Amino acid sequence: MIHASLPMRRTRRWAALASLLLAATAGPALAQSMILPEGMTIQLETRQELSSKSARVGDPVELAVAKPVTIGGVTLIPAGSPAVGEVSRARDNGLLGRSGKLDIKVSTVKAGGIDVPVRGERNAKGKSGTLGAVGAGILFLPLAVIIRGKDVKLPSGTLFEVYVDREVNIGSNAAPAAPGVTAPYEGREAPTSIKTIDPNQALGS
């Protein structure tokens, strides 16, 4: 049997002690970065085309995190993580100039095995069919974005933002951030960027 020399055993002991000290000092910082604060912005994207003409209230909407949510170099929610959304209102373009409407409600975003509650509702409204109606445009409102168009159509890859509704401890789901990571999505085209406003912040601030 071959025994390790005394200097080698001492070296291993010092290496083990150094590892323990490093873990002890890094632990509090990592634990702090695992907290997802209330009000933090999460950018989502649609992964299906939606239309007020075919959508029905209660229809599930396929959504995903568009870019990683990171704090202090630690990824709390990776890009591509799914979000739970559904159609909360859908109205097709009708007679007498009635415009189409489409509302999407998002309740939670998945962070590993944890459901992160979010707030923010994204509203879409079609352009009126009456003579002299204002052309297409975007109007920013708290909890909503109104898109004016004859029939509301949201292409796959439409971006919008939601906000963490309350502080959440992600725990062991956190991981070191990987630069340049994007959501794996085949057939992805240039997205339509749309901004929402946090209702807890004063307009114009």
Image: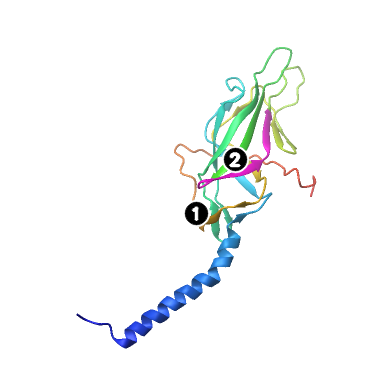
Front-most of residues 34 and 162: 34
The dot on residue 108 is 2
Residue drawn at x 75%, y 39% is 142
Q: SS class of the residue under badge 2?
A: strand
Q: What residue type is labelled 2?
A: Thr
Please tell me how many numbered marks the rendered image carries.
2
Q: Give the residue pinned by disc 1.
A: 180
Q: Is residue 195 magenta?
A: no
Front-most of residues 9 and 49: 9
The dot on residue 35 is none
Q: In which quarter of the image is the N terminus?
A: bottom left
Q: SS class of the residue under badge 1?
A: loop
- Left/right placement of residue 58 relative to residue 21 reads right
In the rendered image, the residue lying farthest to the top is 95
- 169 up-or-down from 81: above or below: below
Image quarter of residue 71: bottom right
- 32 up-or-down from 98: above or below: below
Residue drawn at x 60%, y 22% is 56
Q: How crowded is mark 1: few (under 14 residues within 10 Å), some or many (20 or more)?
A: few
- Left/right placement of residue 47 relative to residue 140 reads left
Residue drawn at x 33%, y 87% is 7
Can residue 82 be seen here? The reply is yes
User: Horizontal and vertical percent for residue 144?
Assistant: 71, 35
Image quarter of residue 52: top right
Spatial separation of the CA atoms under disc 1 and disc 2: 25 Å
Q: Which of marks 1 and 2 is in front?
A: 2
Compare marks 1 and 2 and give the one earlier in the sequence: 2
Q: What residue type is labelled 1?
A: Gly
Residue drawn at x 76%, y 17% is 131
The magenta span reads 111-124
User: Horizontal and vertical percent for residue 161?
Assistant: 64, 42
